Image: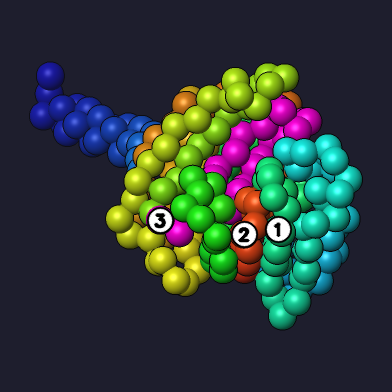
Amino acid sequence: MQPKKSLFYCLGLLCFTAVANAQKAPDINPKEYNLQKNLVFEDNFDDDKNGWLKEEAEDSTDTDTSFVNSAETKIAKGYLKYDNRSKSGVFAAGIETNIDFNRDFEIEIKALVFYASDDYAGVGVLFWGRDSAKNATYLYFNNYQYFEMVDCNCNDWKNCKGKGKNTKNQNLNDFNKITIRHIGKYYYFFLNERFQKKFSFRPLIGHRIGLGSAKNCTMIYDYIKVYYLN
């Protein structure tokens, strides 16, 4: 090969390599907290524009109307508060959205366990992708540094499958930032922007998302946000 042609060949190869590297999608580390994302839903609880206060019996783990009436829900001063004084069950009010919970997404909430009468595995509750009361994915959490992901696709609550995680960086007497991220076949759970545990993902057909409180407990939520990941 002549020197001039060799020079042009090398320059062309370098340009091709540079363009190829520029077009190659960067690798994503799902355990890294800060990823590119687009906000698709947000509620800072300045009002009830999304209908959180319109709770219904089917939004709880109990179909008894008296159970629902014992759970007081308020929106005031930028907070959503669930004061559940029932003697059994978890109350979780849900709202309908157009969010696709089968694509890569992220749910972020800021929550405070205001009062818990006992050492419950689940004082607060977050659910998403809900089609019915027994077809959804749930995250339960308390003020004893324990979180549990529960997948329900059955007719009996006893058959729901759950996996727990003990944490070490929970603010026990303050708000905590809780993030659920779905990428591919897994969920990635973050607490105060620190990765905690990976859970298996199951496709969901519903679009409801909800928050709630266990029996004889009080939960306060500062906000809820949902993102689609780029």
At label 2, the amino acid type is Cys
On screen, residue 172 versus residue 126, left or right, reads left
On screen, residue 158 versus residue 46, left or right, reads left
At label 3, the amino acid type is Tyr
Badge 3 marks a residue whose secondary structure is loop
Tell me which corner region of the image, top left, top right, bottom left or bottom right, holds residue 60: top right
Q: Residue furthest bottom?
A: 77
Label 3: which residue? 144
Query: Residue 41: x, y in percent?
Result: 70, 54
Structural distance between the alpha carbons of marks 3 and 2: 14 Å
Badge 1 marks a residue whose secondary structure is strand
The quadrant the C terminus occupies is top right
Quick one: label 2, few (<14), some, or many (20+) residues within 10 Å?
many
Badge 2 marks a residue whose secondary structure is strand
- The reply to whether dot 1 and dot 2 touch (C-beta < 8 Å) is yes
Magenta stretch, residue numbers: 124-144
Tell me which corner region of the image, top left, top right, bottom left or bottom right, holds residue 58: top right
The quadrant the N terminus occupies is top left
Tell me which corner region of the image, top left, top right, bottom left or bottom right, holds residue 75: bottom right
Label 2: which residue? 217
Q: Looking at the picture, does residue 167 appear above or below residue 151?
A: below
